[in-house]
Amino acid sequence: MADGEPRTAEQIATIANVDPRHLKELLSANAVNEYVNYEHDSERFYMTPEQIAVFATEQSPANMQGLWQIIVAQFAEHETAVEVFRTGKGRPWGEQHACQFCGTDRFFRPGYEANLVNQWIPTLEGVKERLEAGGTVADIGCGHGSSSVLIAKFFPDSRVFGFDMHEPSITDARNKATAAGVENVEFSTADAATIPSNGGYDFACIFDALHDMGDPVGVARHIRNGLKPGGTLMVVEPMAGDNTEDNLHALGDVFYAASTLICLPNSRSQEVALCLGAQAGPKRLGRCCATQDLVQFVSRRPLRPISFSRQETRKCEVDIAHPGETLKKSEFGARRQPLGNLASGYTTVARRAPVSVVLVATPGSPKILSLAACRT
Ligand SMILES: C[S@@+](CC[C@H](N)C(=O)[O-])C[C@H]1O[C@@H](n2cnc3c(N)ncnc32)[C@H](O)[C@@H]1O
């Protein structure tokens, strides 16, 4: 369905090699939830460009399939989760269901592919230049290594070291590097608190992993001590405000839930057990990393659209961005419209967050033209 063409359930079943009657039932369920659309005259199902971005394009930063895998992982072992929740005894990352690991990589990787090399690294003073000249990089808590492989690929004269304490993830990361034909990256199983300095790092980065650690303060200190003079530590964390009330929106919903089941239990299972949580916010992250002058933060992710239900759509307001346009914070609110009032052709894929703006495609356009990433 990723081509957007309307087809009957029978036609789709032939392509997908599944039973047509069962597929029709499933497609109808998805049509109820507006994940696909149904044309009653021709009895055909199709997806809009926005639905394709969320459900059917792996490279899309809006793709949510990895998140569903993470949810499946939680259902599969919910008795363990209940026990951990009741006792507070902690649960190491490696004791999650296997879907957790590939789901996490699938969920975050498109965001790294879209932003890491083109946007995040260039915003850091001097980092791109050092990596182009041939620097040494540490990617700590690298998981399946997508970010490490990306950096190694785009900076072939640099050497990249990826570390994670979860051995199966490191095996997967090595396979990923081999499949990509990237040779200037090396992966090791290691606790972030004890990674080797490899002669000093020009650039160290932690993607969505600092808050998972039991001792983020000690880890940040250890990594800072391993930087070369003028080296940079980049911490990428889920977008969050400093206070709980700042995070009571759709994105906070996802990250607080994941944090309850995954991040806090992992932190609790490690030394110090700080339990920072996945919505830590810049102030607490800043305190963890201690020396603001040495550390530049990239603590906000760009827009990651989330599909709203029809009811939410009615009450959700968005600012309209033109294709390719990035709204500044000062422009927030100036072009606000209720999402539910928009003419068809506008996307119904949106994210609601207090300080973020949403991409909306042009009226009447059958295509989503671009995603507006807004920095605040
Ligand atoms: C949410 S995942 C993020 C993985 C990857 N950076 C990404 O963005 O896809 C958090 C990762 O941190 C790793 N981790 C947690 N505590 C760690 C520690 N103390 N030392 C090293 N890795 C750790 C986990 O094994 C897991 O792979």
Image: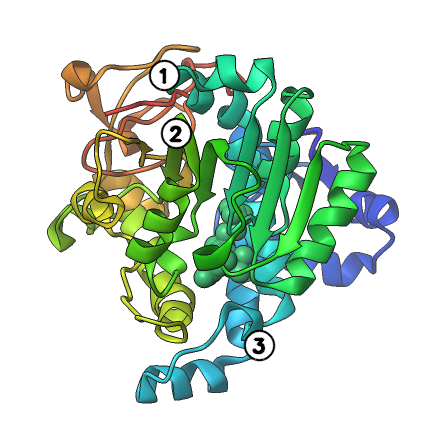
What residue is pinned by disc 1?
Answer: 125
Instruction: Give the left or right position of residue 61, taking residue 145 as reference.
Output: left
Asked if the beta carbon under badge 2 is closer than 8 A to the nearest atom of ligand 1, the reply is no
Q: Rounded to the nearest whole Å, what is the CA distance between mark 2 and mark 3?
A: 40 Å
**Residue at image point 65% right, 63% down:** 167
Element type at mark 2: strand
**Amino acid type, residue under disc 3 in the picture:** Ala
**Amino acid type, residue under disc 2 in the picture:** Thr
**Amino acid type, residue under disc 1 in the picture:** Glu
Q: Rounded to the nearest whole Å, what is the CA distance between mark 2 and mark 1?
A: 9 Å
Q: Quadrant of residue 122?
A: top left
Where is residue 325? Give x, y as percent: 37, 10
Nearer to us in this view, 247 or 281: 281
**Around disc 1, counting alpha carbons within 10 Å, would you say few (fewer than 14), some (14 to 19), or many (20 or more)?**
few
**Around disc 2, counting alpha carbons within 10 Å, would you say few (fewer than 14), some (14 to 19), or many (20 or more)?**
many
User: Is residue 32 shown to the viewer in this render?
Assistant: no
**Residue at image point 43% right, 27% down:** 347
The numbered dot on residue 76 is 3
Instruction: Give the left or right position of residue 64, taking residue 260 as reference.
Output: right
Quadrant (top left/top right/bottom left/bottom right) for the C terminus: top left
Element type at mark 1: loop
Q: Are marks 2 and 1 in contact (CB under 8 Å)?
A: yes
Q: Quadrant of residue 84?
A: bottom left
What residue is pinned by disc 2?
Answer: 232
Quadrant (top left/top right/bottom left/bottom right) for the N terminus: top right
User: Is residue 117 shown to the viewer in this render?
Assistant: yes
Nearest to N terminus: mark 2 or mark 1: 1
Nearer to us in this view, 115 or 195: 195
**Residue at image point 45% right, 77% down:** 91
Task: Give above or below for 28 relative to 333.
Answer: below
The numbered dot on residue 31 is none
**Around disc 3, counting alpha carbons within 10 Å, would you say few (fewer than 14), some (14 to 19), or many (20 or more)?**
some
